Image: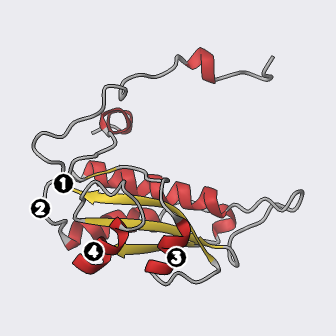
Amino acid sequence: MKFIELAQDRYSLRKFSEKPVEKEKLGLVLQAGRLAPTACNNQPQKILVIESEEAVAKLKDCTRYHFSAPMALLVCYDNTVSWKRSYDSKDSGDIDASIVGTHMMLQAAELGLGTTWVGHFDPAAVRKAFSIPENLVPVALFPLGYPADDAGPSNQHTSRKPLEETVFYNRFS
């Protein structure tokens, strides 16, 4: 499959089957995150694989957007390692974690798995439930698994603004 087709066909999965994700496929998803570019190649990402029944139950206490997936990935970054821009001290950790998450999301889609980007979670609850150290900043959750038989993209999936509304050349006005 060509990349543009993968990007077009991938959708936010919100209905999972109970089929477990094979270790080999999980390994490829995690490897895709490992290969993602990060600022200065500092690789500040820290990924928590949430796969045991106990851990998945704890996750359900932190967000209602777990979609009953058999597992999830919590992408964090280490703010003691992430690159900071010298002009204004902008921390690139959230950007790095987002690139890592996107790589993993697209790899999952190529493997026939599904996921969705979940930013709506209680960071304090996640931090407490999973004993996350202070230097790690939770960025996104990715429920992960196989699509249920009746799963499909939302009605808004194909709704995209024309490039003329989002792309500008040389200046914005």
Q: Where residue 73 sits: x, y (%)? A: 38, 66
Query: Which quadrant holds the N terminus?
Result: top left
Asked whether, in this view, residue 64 is left or right of residue 51, the answer is: right
Nearer the camera: disc 1 or disc 3: 3
Q: Which residue is mark 3?
A: 127
Count all numbered tags in the image, as a single digit.
Answer: 4
Q: Is residue 10 above or below residue 23?
A: above
Check whether the beta carbons of the residues at disc 2 and disc 3 lie within 8 A of each other.
no
Mark 2 and mark 4 lie on one chain; the one further toward the N terminus is: 2
Q: Residue at x 58, y 84 (%)?
A: 133
Q: Residues within 10 Å of mark 3 (few under 14, many from 20)?
A: some
Q: Determine which of the numbered discs, if any, sits on residue 146 in the image.
A: 1
Q: Which amino acid does the dot numbered 3 rest on?
A: Arg
Asked whether, in this view, residue 32 is left or right of residue 108, the answer is: right
Nearer the camera: disc 3 or disc 4: 3
Residue situated furthest right in the rendering = 87
Q: Residues within 10 Å of mark 1 (few under 14, many from 20)?
A: many
Check whether the beta carbons of the residues at disc 2 and disc 4 lie within 8 A of each other.
no
Q: Determine which of the numbered discs, if any, sits on residue 73 in the image.
A: none
Nearer the camera: disc 2 or disc 3: 3
Q: Residue at x 81, y 16 (%)?
A: 173
What element does badge 2 sit on? loop
Q: Which residue is mark 4?
A: 51
Quadrant hosting residue 83: bottom right
What element does badge 3 sit on? helix
What element does badge 4 sit on? loop
Q: Which amino acid does the dot numbered 4 rest on?
A: Glu
Rounded to the nearest whole Å, what is the CA distance between mark 3 and mark 4? 17 Å
Q: Which amino acid does the dot numbered 1 rest on?
A: Tyr
Q: Which residue is mark 2?
A: 19
